[in-house]
């Protein structure tokens, strides 16, 4: 809903003022929402464990590195492809694309085997979660 209403508000602001007005209008709206949230969102009362070496061991550093590398390379390939000298047929664009897909595939493989995965793969069996991710991907 935020994406849709943001796009509508941006379109109206651009139509009646300029594209710069979009940033001012959205900044005012975000400021109002932030102010209201201070009074309406309850505080986090959950107990927290202290940051120790054991806590760090439960963080999936390999999964994080694979995700960042995969998404970064895939985004670079898609972003650079239109401006490259031979378009998407340019060698480094193809290399970035292939490596990005390989890293993302390796991330999925790793998450099935990790002791403390970033994304437990069983979550994809939940119909509502899978449907939500599909809707977000198509957005």
Image (tube, rainbow, N blue to C red):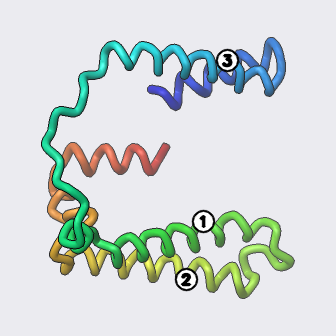
- Rendering coords of residue 47 (x, y %): 13, 43
Q: Mark 3 or 1 closer to N-term?
A: 3
Q: Relative to 90, is 127 on the left or the right?
A: left
Q: Is residue 24 above or below residue 102?
A: above
- Rendering coords of residue 75 (x, y %): 60, 65
Q: Crowdedness of circle 1 by 10 Å Cα count: few (<14), some, many (20+)?
A: some
Looking at the rendered structure, the secondary structure element under dot 1 is helix
The residue tagged 3 is 25
Instruction: Kindly identify the residue that appears in the image at 72 percent across and 87 percent down.
Output: 91
Q: Nearer the viewer, residue 102 or 29?
A: 29
Residue 84's mark?
A: none
Instruction: Kindly identify the residue that appears in the image at 82 percent across and 15 percent down.
Output: 17
Q: Nearer the viewer, residue 49 or 100?
A: 49
**Residues at marks 3 and 1, CA–CA distance in whole angstroms:** 29 Å
Looking at the rendered structure, the secondary structure element under dot 2 is helix
The residue tagged 1 is 75
Q: Quadrant of the N terminus?
A: top left
Residues at marks 1 and 2 touching, judged by CB atoms closer than 8 Å: no
Q: Nearer the viewer, residue 100 or 54?
A: 54
Residue 98's mark?
A: 2
Q: Relative to 112, is 31 on the left or the right?
A: right
- Rendering coords of residue 52 (x, y %): 23, 66
Q: Mark 1 or 2 closer to N-term?
A: 1
């Amino acid at each position: 809903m935020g994406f849709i209403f943001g796009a509508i508000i941006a379109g109206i602001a651009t139509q009646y003022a300029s594209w710069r007005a979009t940033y001012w209008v959205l900044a005012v709206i975000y400021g109002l929402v932030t102010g209201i949230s201070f009074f309406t969102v309850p505080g986090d009362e959950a107990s927290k464990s202290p940051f120790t070496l054991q806590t760090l061991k439960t963080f999936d550093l390999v999964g994080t590195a694979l995700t960042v590398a995969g998404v970064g390379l895939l985004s670079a390939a898609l972003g650079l492809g239109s401006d490259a000298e031979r378009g998407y047929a340019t060698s480094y664009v193809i290399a970035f694309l292939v490596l990005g897909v390989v890293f993302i595939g390796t991330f999925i493989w790793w998450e099935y085997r990790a002791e403390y995965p970033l994304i437990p793969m069983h979550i994809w069996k939940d119909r509502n979660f899978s449907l939500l991710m599909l809707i977000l991907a198509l957005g």
